[in-house]
Image: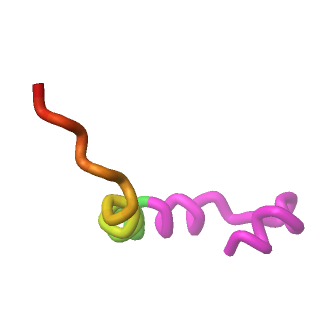
Amino acid sequence: MRNRIVHDYFNINEEIVWEVATTEISTLVDLLKRFVPPTPSE
């Protein structure tokens, strides 16, 4: 999808992009949490 957005942005279906973004965001957040160190509690 990245290649399509970067190189063919005049023919992008925004509904598909939104659908993928909203359905896959929780998976992405879970993956990224592995790389973010916990914040110290105050």
Q: Quadrant of the C terminus?
A: top left
Q: Residue furthest left?
A: 42
Q: What residue lies at 47% left-to-right and 65% top-to-bottom?
A: 19
Q: Nearer the viewer, residue 33 or 2?
A: 33
Q: How many marks?
A: 0
Is residue 16 left or right of 38 when viewed as pictured? right
Q: What residue lies at 39% left-to-right and 61% top-to-bottom?
A: 35
Is residue 4 left or right of 29 when viewed as pictured? right
Q: Please say if 42 is above or below 9.
A: above
Q: Residue furthest top?
A: 42
Q: Nearer the viewer, residue 7 or 10?
A: 7
Is residue 14 left or right of 12 when viewed as pictured? left
State whether the magenta stretch is mostly helix, strand or loop. Answer: helix
* Figure colour scheme: rainbow
Q: Please say if 39 is above or below 24.
A: above
Rendered location of residue 26, percent (x, y): 32, 63
Q: Please say if 34 is above or below 1.
A: above
Q: Nearer the viewer, residue 42 or 3?
A: 42
Q: What residue lies at 68% left-to-right and 74% top-to-bottom?
A: 1
Is residue 6 left or right of 20 when viewed as pictured? right
Rendered location of residue 25, percent (x, y): 40, 61
- Part of the protein shown in magenta: 1-21
Rendered location of residue 37, percent (x, y): 31, 51
Q: What residue lies at 76% left-to-right and 64% top-to-bottom?
A: 5
User: Was residue 16 drawn as part of the magenta stretch in this picture?
Assistant: yes
